[in-house]
Image (spheres, grey):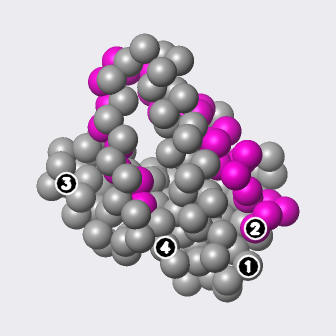
Amino acid sequence: MNPKIFKAYDIRGKYPREINENIVMEIVDKFLPRKLKIKIIIGRDARLSSPNLYKAAIKRLKIQSADWRRKLKIVPAGLITTPMLSFLVNYLKADFGIMITASHNPKEYNGLKIVGKNAMPISGKDVLQLL
């Protein structure tokens, strides 16, 4: 995994060379704390690569939930905007939110924006330290 994809505000790179389904699953697998009970909202943007990355993230979360024998409540929000994800994290009192997006970057990019409680942003560099 290329550490250059971990930016100040998010995780992003060119799809599929720098960020792909396997990398998304690895990030999702390792950054969440191993608490017994976590609620996580997950959404995606309209990029062509987003549905596959979204499915990979949800798949890994479901595997984690079964493997760790814990209550991991996954709320798949589908196609939404980043502000909508933040709203849902607050409204549903979730522990985390993951948005599959590369924001304003060109179409060949994709990535993850991660927020914690109260939709507080978690930087890509912070996620890298957890990995």
Find disc 2 in the rendering and name its residue: 15
Percent across and percent down for residue 3 are: 76, 50
Percent across and percent down for residue 102 are: 58, 72
Residue in the foreground of this view, choosing between 77 and 98: 77
Q: Give, as a single range, the part of the protein colored magenta.
A: 15-43
Name which residue type carries label 2: Tyr
Crowdedness of circle 1 by 10 Å Cα count: few (<14), some, many (20+)? Answer: some
Can the viewer see residue 11 in this picture? no
Crowdedness of circle 3 by 10 Å Cα count: few (<14), some, many (20+)? Answer: some
Name which residue type carries label 1: Glu
Disc with the residue nearer the chain's start (4 vs 2): 2
Name which residue type carries label 3: Asn
Name which residue type carries label 4: Asp
Question: Can you say whether 126 is above or below 82 in the image?
Answer: above
Q: Are marks 4 and 1 in contact (CB under 8 Å)?
A: no
Q: Are marks 4 and 3 in contact (CB under 8 Å)?
A: no
Q: Secondary structure at mark 3?
A: helix
Residue in the foreground of this view, choosing between 118 and 82: 82
Disc with the residue nearer the chain's start (4 vs 3): 4
Q: Secondary structure at mark 4?
A: loop
Find disc 1 in the rendering and name its residue: 108
* Mark 4 vs mark 3, CA separation in Å: 19 Å
Find disc 3 in the rendering and name its residue: 90
Can the viewer see residue 70 in this picture? yes
Residue in the foreground of this view, choosing between 125 and 104: 104
